[in-house]
Amino acid sequence: MDRRTVLKGLAGVGSLAATGGLSMPALSQGAAARTLRFVPQANLANFDPIWGTQYVVRNAAALVWDTLYGLDATLQPQRQMVESEEVSDDGLVWTFRLRPGLKFHDGEPVRSKDVIASLARWSARDPMGLMLKAIQNELTAVDDRTFKWALKAPYPKMLLALGKNSTPCAFIMPERIAQTDPFKQIPEYVGSGPMKFAKGEWVPGAKAVFEKFADYAPRQEKASWLAGGKQMLVDRIEWVVIPDPATAAAALQNGEVDWWESPITDLVPSLKKNRNINVDIADPLGNIGSFRMNHLHPPFNDVKVRRAVLAALSQEDYMRALVGDDTALWKPLPGFFTPDTPLYTEEGGEILKGKRDLATAKKLLAESGYSGQPVTCVVAQDQPITKAQGDVTADLLKQIGMNVDFVATDWGTVGSRRAQKTPPGQGGWGMFHTWHAGADCISPAAYNAIRANGDKAWFGWPTSEVVEKEVTAWFDAKNLDEEKAAAKRLNKAAMEDVVYAPTGFFLSYTAWRKNISGIAKGPLPFFWGVSKTA
Amino acid sequence: MSISTSSTAPVPPGLVIAPQLPDLMVPVAIRRGVFGFLRNHPTVAIGGALLLCLVLVGIFAPWLGTVDPTALAPGRRTRLPSADFWFGTDLLGRDIYSRVLYGARVSLTVGLSVAVLASLAGLAIGLVSGFVRWADGIVMRFMDGLMSIPPILLAVALMALTRASVGNVILAITIAEVPRVSRLVRSVVLSLREQPYVGAATASGTRTPMVILRHILPNTLAPMLVQATYICASAMIVESILSFIGAGTPPTIPSWGNIMAEGRALWQVKPYIVFFPAAFLSVTVLAVNLLGDGLRDALDPRMAKSL
Amino acid sequence: MVSYILRRILSTLPVMGIVALFVFSLLYIAPGDPAAVIAGDQASPADVERIRQGLGLDRPFLVQFGTWLWHILHGDLGTSIFTNLPVSAMIAQRIEPTFSLMAITLVLTILVAVPLGVAAAWKAGSWVDRTIMAFAVFAFSLPVFVVGYVLAYVFALQFEWLPVQGYTPLAAGIWPWLQNLILPALALGSVYIALIARITRASMLEVLQQDYVRTARAKGLGQRNILFVHALKNAAVPIVTVIGIGIALLIGGAVVTESVFAIPGLGRLTIDAILRRDYPVIQGIVLLFSFLYVLVNLMVDVTYTLVDPRIRY
């Protein structure tokens, strides 16, 4: 795992002071330098990281709420709120001790009962939490700083579950808030993280403000992703929501904002030309593009049709449509796990490699008895990633002679329509597009999309006993070699059944003005250690 | 974004203001033949000719040196305009020239369909509420309600209800435009009903359908024609805005709004993607507006004199 | 007069009621589902259903509508599904930018359009008239986002005179407030300027041909006097009318302008709410817009009596 320590390296630090544009706000120089203005990938529309699991909510929540453990840049969970832990020899009883001096933003100390209520709410929603809940004997407080989690079966991935960065993270909230029904929204936003949420200044769709929490006690280690000392070097972070990328680019060039989380690739060359701006890869773990076919209904209930689509699919087309001409930003992905991570394998991925084979695709399609039934392809137009993929898919299906019923709509509609199990003609669907953060696809732990347990599986409801067997094998694995072997068999089975169609692996950029330093590469924007000079 | 508002100022009941609906009469000019008419009304000629050209471009798009406007080629995306790609290529490598030419079909179809449908629906509703006293209150309150929702928002909401398709775009814009036409028709009907000859016809036992056919329709035609051109122009702009905010024509069909929506993020670095469809849209709307202005002047002699 | 205004206000109630019912039914049959948006991409179908129940979206239509109406009658617009903030508070946050944009657009429009229209009418048929009208027809034909992008490119990016995006509250000072609004107001106003200039010209022409204006001319009254005292005063009624209905046009245009210039106003709130299916917010805003529309029309009617004393109620 040496390789990944490289990821820890902080991105280049510019020393040139930016020239303030005409439009610098009327703040004093000092105050301006203590305020970081950040353009997030999306609007922060709600702020309950357990109830709502969009990435943008998680990213904001990581400022306000702390976690017991935190994944570091080597993908290892490290102690964060926890001072020490102990596991019984049989692996059934975990005892955790909290660090002294932890405080919530309302001044109350963090106690075991807060942790227990938070874990109870989280485990009702999180896939790993649900597994823990299923084998839980009891979760109890020993004293104010010590709590015990007794299980019916060993759970070796315990620390990963508590420290992972895939949504929903196990954020710790005060007991009174954590007692909220996990399917209802929390009423207040009090955490023990390094920043306080300024609810009064929140303008959903436009602005969210975070203020430094003076009583936060960071760890002594160096910060690394969600682990280590979360030292805040600015007093105030303003999230400025700019829905239009052209406007966001202009605002960054003009110095109206300091950091743009996800600039679109086509604008990056002009940003790079600006001497006040740095651009770099945001997250080496990148993203995996995906479209899912409905395994319940014709034509995609036939594995031959799914294989036909895979045989014709050109990942290069998808990737170019997504990230443009910058070849450094994407690579083909004949597998399901994140490239350059331990479990990555191309086992069974031959069908996605080499020259695209329209003839085989058409032959498979003919063998399946496909006779021109319309394929209901539901595409969200308000998400650039799904939109671009949808355009390519429409063209792909047309080329292999499938009859596409292209339903262009918005994410709100896709979100509800994909949950329909009815046939496509009766409100259901045939295929939809999405993407997964590479950080979530490093293992089956938080990787819903790879599961194939039929009705309980993710949308598309694939059924494959082999896939499920290998997922269990991974969870039970004692060491990395066993994990790797399980992942290989899993990848092959998932490819044969076409659990879903990976459209490629792509990276995205992040861009900031040169008077900002300390931006770390990772699956979410980390604000600790980031500083700003006037 | 309703341009049509210009000729249908809502008039509070019982209030007569100066230049309400002009006294309309069958244009004298028409009797002098089409060419004479066009010579007297150059704006109609210019607008009409431009519009005709665009209609022809739309119809004959496949034979005007175009390629498949939906054929993807991600390998040659965002190319500058050149001899091969006259207007360049878009983010998916599609030929913008072909897309713009085919896009004329969508804009014109939407513009013309909405103009016709909104006029017919507005005519029917306007006639009903002008003649049927008890329905008037209900219908007009409902129209007031519809009208009080900004047309764009109404159209966006209606599009959210259904799936993106040209038909639904037409329907959504039509629904948003109907209240304005029905108000116009109603006000014409109400003012005509007060005319002695209409009163005489009713008194002498002529049935309402006959009154409508003989006296009302001919007098409504002229203002409606003018109104229809503005609705047409407005509909084309609304279509582009709907597509622009992602709630319009489906992306599988090239439309000017779609092309601009897809290119909008790159307007700083690749302005041509937005420029060509924007130019075509502007010229088309311009043509329709010129036609409308010309018709209004021609059909309203008092105005015509002053030009 | 007072009783007239009261009657008018009362007559708006059924209109608002119809709007409320109409919008509520639209949203009820709309396909999207806020629960699915909230649950996020990785959520399981069962989670989505539980969230739906938590939001009360599984109740029958009449129950939902009744509950909502009951709250409205008690002055409660409800709570946003997503943000958990009161709808009234979310609208209040967004009113200032939108109203500022509309006010500046309106002022700008009247300052530019009315003189242009008057000039065109006075010099009817001359090159002045033709130029102004050509400009008007052209500006009329440009979609607002095209104008917005061009203005931002030239004045914000090339010359760097004005900021590209954002909004500064009026409380931060007149100039910071104004500089964020000049470009959006110009973009939004272009169509509007064209419209008002044309109407002003047409109304002026009408009035200029009236006997009393001819008499005034014959009497040798000064041109300026005739134009601004006699003619413009009489032409004011249709101009005011158009300004009134233009509010609906402005709101529509504001949706696009706000999104191009990243102004946190009501227009963007509406689009966001529609895309996310945040029902209470959509309903609240539509009610507000309808109310505004009705209110402005009322104000226009009252203005008639001020600009034209011949009109009596």
Image (spheres, rainbow, N blue to C red):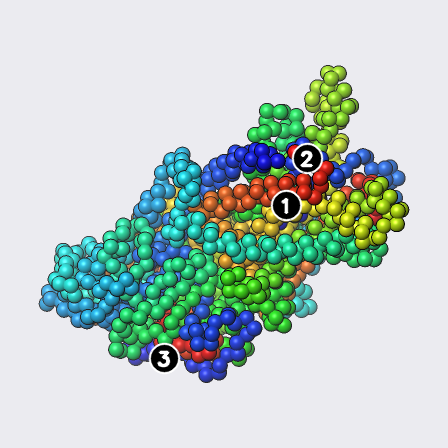
Which residue is denoted by mark 3 in the rendering?
Answer: A9
User: How many residues crowd mark 2 within 10 Å: few (<14), some (14–19), many (20+)?
Assistant: few
Whether the residues at callouts 3 and 2 have beta carbons within 8 Å, the answer is no
Q: How many residues crowd around disc 3 within 10 Å: few (fewer than 14), some, or many (20 or more)?
A: some
* Disc on res. C312: 2
- On screen, A38 above or below C54? below
Q: Are marks 1 and 3 in contact (CB under 8 Å)?
A: no
Q: Can residue A252 be seen in this view?
A: no
Q: Where is residue A17 in the image (x, y as percent from the top left)?
A: 49, 81
Q: Name the residue under label 1.
A: C244
Q: Which residue is drawn at 57% across and 50% down?
A: C251
Judging from the image, mark 3 belongs to the subunit labelled A
Q: In this view, does A392 lie above or below B20?
A: below
Indicate left or right for B233 with A463 as reference. Answer: right
Q: Residue furthest bottom?
A: A15
Viewer-nearest residue: B173 or C154: C154
Residue lying furthest left: A89
Instruction: Check if mark 3 and mark 2 are on a common chain.
Output: no
Nearer to me, A128 or C101: C101
Residue flagged by tag 1: what amino acid is it?
A: Gly
